[in-house]
Amino acid sequence: MDIVHNTPDVMIGGGRKHFEARKDSLNMSDSLRAKGYDVVYTLEDAINSPSKYLAAFCAEDKLPTVVDGRGDFLPRAVDLAIKKLKKEKNGFFLMVEGSQIDMRCHSNDMVGEIGEVLDFDDAVAVALEFARKDKHTLVVITADHETGGLAILQKGAYEGAEKFRHKFTTTGHTGVPVPIYAYGPGSQNYEGLMQNSDHKAIMARLMGLK
């Protein structure tokens, strides 16, 4: 309900059933359409949509993993969102999540984790390319927690075919600190160790919000 009453201009992802097959029988997609949103079900339809307000539910539930054939959905979705939002004269705030990284680590799936991280890296590259050209955009990359406790038991050679022994130490979350990378105006606010709850205050200050 909150997402209908406090709607972002652009939403791209999965989760169609959570809007249209709800236990309360409400169809949130119809509610979005009534508010002027173009509701679509494929990324291609989203790319071709002329609407300023877009809701793209491209899977009934979760999107497939990279290994299972999601392709370059995430970087393309980031590119589309930026193209839509950059038209705002007062700037924009865009949040992108590579959620399947966490899921693959919960499953201790090394191949899946690598695929998801590389895919997220491609999405970050899209955002950084825009920020470099725009020169007024701050990009912040971080995580809410570490998952899996991946340990490198024995590293291989740095030249040639690298091989190493690894082991996940848990299927849950850990207390290992996660990195924060920042690029652009305001990036100097992200230095040293900080609590994840500090993000809200920093972002609010940089955006001039009370």
Image: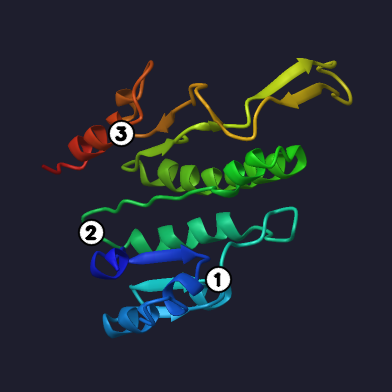
Secondary element under disc 2, as helix, strand or loop, is loop
For the residue marked with disc 1, what is the amino acid? Answer: Cys
Q: Residues within 10 Å of mark 3 (few under 14, many from 20)?
A: some
Q: Going from the N terminus, do you reach mark 2 or mark 1 first? A: 1
Question: Which x, y percent locates residue 84?
Answer: 38, 65
Q: Are marks 3 and 1 in contact (CB under 8 Å)?
A: no
Q: Nearer the viewer, mark 3 or mark 2?
A: 3
Please name the residue shown 36% across and 34% down the image: 184
Q: CA distance from mark 2 to mark 1?
A: 29 Å
Q: Residues within 10 Å of mark 1 (few under 14, many from 20)?
A: many
Q: Nearer the viewer, mark 2 or mark 1?
A: 1
Secondary element under disc 1, as helix, strand or loop, is loop
Q: Are marks 2 and 1 in contact (CB under 8 Å)?
A: no
Image quadrant in which you'd find residue 35: bottom left
- Total number of numbered discs in the rendering: 3
Residue 49 visible at all: no
Question: Which x, y percent locates residue 10?
Answer: 38, 65
The residue lying furthest to the front in this view is 23
Q: CA distance from mark 3 to mark 1?
A: 29 Å
Question: Which x, y percent locates residue 191?
Answer: 36, 19
For the residue marked with disc 3, what is the amino acid? Answer: His
The residue that mark 1 highlights is 58
The residue that mark 2 highlights is 89
Residue 179 visible at all: yes
Which label was assigned to residue 199?
A: 3
Image quadrant in which you'd find residue 159: top right
Please name the residue shown 24% across and 64% down the image: 6
Is 27 above or below relative to 178?
A: below
